[in-house]
Amino acid sequence: MEKIVVQGGKRLQGEVSISGAKNAAVAIIPAAILVDGVCVIENVPNIRDVHVIVGIMEHMGAKIEFLDKYTLRIDCSCMDKQTAPQEMVRKMRASYYLLGALLGRFHRAEVAMPGGCNFGSRPIDQHIKGFKALGAKVFCEGVVKAAADELNGTSIYLDIVSVGATINVMLAAVLAKGRTTIENVAKEPHIVDVANFLNAMGADIKGAGTDVIRIRGVERLKGGTYSIIPDQIEAGTFMIAAAATGGDILVKNIIPKHMESVSAKLIEIGAQVEELDDAIRVLGTGKIKNANVKTLPYPGFPTDMQPQMVSLLSVASGTSIVTESVWDSRFQYVDELRRMGADIRVDGKTAVINGVERLEGAAVSATDLRGGAGMVIAGLMAQGTTEIYELQHIDRGYEKMEEKFQALGADIRRVIG
């Protein structure tokens, strides 16, 4: 059994380079199914979720190779299956993007209900609503089956702002006949990145990053080369780690505009934040003020940064209130923080955090991907030794996290057994 062992109390200092965005990569890679030709995708993060989606597509007939550690060459011209292997699909949430891509290209898709982190009920009804509006018949009984004689552009209004539904409907509509308008869409940076990738391959998509996306269907997508944007959540994790340890970290290879909500909150709690062209420097002052945080769709504070921020606020002066407005059950990791001495009370979607003087090292588990990142930050702040288990969650979205923290001066290592 693997575990990460952290000896807390070290001030982090130095530079860290951020990997490609996980949330963009796991959508852009299946989007390559729509491409009639070879596409090369650069700045791909070397993480577990990427290897899972690559394995699924190879099983379905795609020819995929790593040209180097961070570059994929994808050729889906020989893909001959429209049914994804169930046991692999259930390893990751983003496998549902196969539905939109397969439906868009083959007018047929069969994909099991996705896996990934368990945050309570996460229906895909808005995805299905979009597919049906485009002309598909959809059946869902553990396995989602979608089929259409042809797909035709239409107007679609999403009942809720959904990142997954926005991307999936966009994928299905790219090769549909006519024009498609999708309203009340999500605006996250990785949605813009997926649209930019598709446009680079010959699609005609306008409005990504706004409330309305307009798509003019094209006959085919050609091959090409595209580079994935930096990961805003990995960047935010290291920014919070700087504030948590009273450190001084230059977070490189990022788009500072994507970090504005995190930067603003760090300034509010007492850290110093300096924005550069493609980097942000965060200087922790050693004093952490209490703050109230509410997660919101972009450009609001990201739900994927909520556990990291709660870990930081657990040692802030005074009382902080964190409200989760995106997922139903995202405070599962709080019990692990309590093992370390945190004083946190959860009531539904709200956590009330009474800051304590310090956390104490303990044996804890990563309950999910971002909860695991929160445990690492807690361990870096804590007095004594923290052991973090269930690392498969962390590895889904962070590339060699412990090595990047080691380079910043952290006493952290991965141990087998």
Image (cartoon, grey):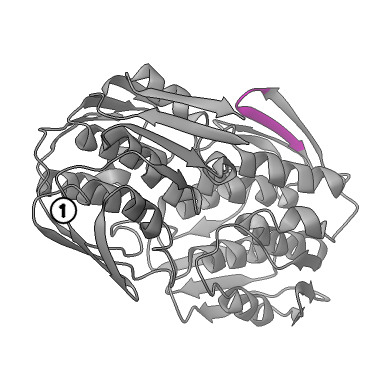
The picture places residue 89, in percent across and down from the top left corner, at 73, 57
The picture places residue 226, in percent across and down from the top left corner, at 57, 35
The picture places residue 117, in percent across and down from the top left corner, at 55, 58
Q: On the image, numbered disc 1 is attached to which residue?
A: 355
The answer to whether any part of residue 222 appears in the image is no
Specify the quadrant of the image occupied by residue 132.
Answer: bottom right
> Closest to the observer: 353 or 335?
335
The picture places residue 116, in percent across and down from the top left corner, at 60, 57
> Closest to the observer: 402 or 60?
402
- Magenta region: which residues? 68-74
Left or right side of 212 for 394: right
> Closest to the observer: 333 or 27?
333
Name the image quarter holding the N terminus.
top right
Q: Is residue 378 above or below residue 335?
A: above
Q: Residue at x 44, y 49 (%)?
A: 370
In terms of secondary structure, what is the magenta stretch mainly?
strand
Which SS class for mark 1?
A: loop
Please, what is the three-letter code of the amino acid marked with disc 1? Answer: Gly
Name the image quarter holding the C terminus.
top right
Left or right side of 380 for 126: right
Residue 35 lies in magenta, yes or no? no
Q: Residue at x 77, y 65 (%)?
A: 111
The answer to whether any part of residue 362 appears in the image is yes
Residue 71 lies in magenta, yes or no? yes
- Marker count (numbered): 1
> Closest to the observer: 353 or 167?
353
Q: Residue at x 81, y 67 (%)?
A: 110
